[in-house]
Amino acid sequence: MKAAWQSQVKAALGVVSACSIALSAAGAAVAQSADPQTDALAKSIVEKADQIRFPQEGFEVDVAITTSANGQVTDSRTYKVLSKGNENTIAQVTEPASDRGQALLMRGRDLWIFLPNVSQPVRLSLSQRLTGQVANGDIARANFSGDYTPRILRTEKVDGADTYVLELTAVDRGVTYSKVLYWVRQSNSQPVKAEFYSLSDRLLKTARYEEFKPLAGRPRPSRIVMQDALRKGEESVLEYSDMKLRDLPDKMFSKDYLKRL
């Protein structure tokens, strides 16, 4: 009886010890995730990468999107994009000719499409597909620092370069993706690649930021390759050209103004 009692005491002490270790580890993890310096660093990394992808000032840029499946081109479209401060964007279709006159207007996280034969603009979500693997939010809004709460997961080498790997969690359901894993080069804050996830944590697609060229005064990715994670062999390539800074008045980014266009 005494031996059995001693065995039970040892087992109970083992459980207590294990719980203490688990609680200590959990406390350390919480403390790490709540570290103001770590949070500030993560935010700074994403903000700098945002500034590299697109200017914070008003600008315009031509965007060509080519979609293919298993190496065969299935769709090709071009847009003239006018943007100011990552909060206001107009994306006008320039090709194909049959779709000219169509335009997207984004103000904050509100998005509308204007169609030549429809009197009133139609409300859209940022996550709806625009063409191929490209969502409306991919072309109309590129504000990772404003739409997501970042945290640093780890560091990792990609093509020989040291990168931060960040997890970006959506601030609400109105943004384009529920979660993004984001690789940013440590040496110069250039974005390297990203993985985009649904609300159910399913990988939807990946993006690679390529061919950094001088655009509007600094090196920026002139080519983004977005690959469908669910349908292998399907991808869309976004190519940016003729980017220049412009003084864009706020009145441009209104439904009344776009109707006149």
Image (tube, rainbow, N blue to C red):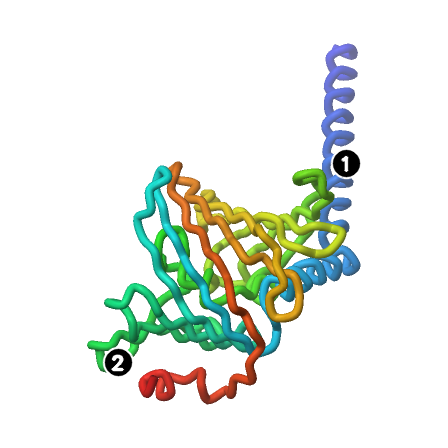
- Asked whether, in this view, residue 218 is left or right of residue 69, the answer is right
Question: What percent of the width, then of the height, locates residue 6?
Answer: 78, 16
Q: Is residue 163 visible?
A: yes
Front-lying residue, 166 or 135: 135
Q: Quick one: label 2 or label 1, which is nearer the N terminus? A: 1
Q: What residue do we see at 70% from left, 58% from top?
A: 45
- Asked whether, in this view, residue 40 is left or right of residue 109, the answer is right
Question: What percent of the width, then of the height, locates residue 193?
Answer: 58, 48
Q: Is residue 231 visible?
A: no
Residue 120 is tagged as 2
The residue type indicated by label 1 comes to Ser
On screen, residue 28 above or below 244: above
The residue type indicated by label 2 comes to Gln
- Asked whether, in this view, residue 189 is left or right of residue 93, the answer is right
Q: CA distance from mark 2 to mark 1?
A: 62 Å
Badge 1 crowding class, 10 Å Cα cut-off, few under 14, some 14 to 19, many 20 or more, is: few
Front-lying residue, 254 or 55: 55
Question: What percent of the width, then of the height, locates residue 211?
Answer: 58, 52
In this figure, which residue is indicated by the disc labeled 1?
Answer: 20
- Asked whether, in this view, residue 84 is left or right of residue 232, the answer is right
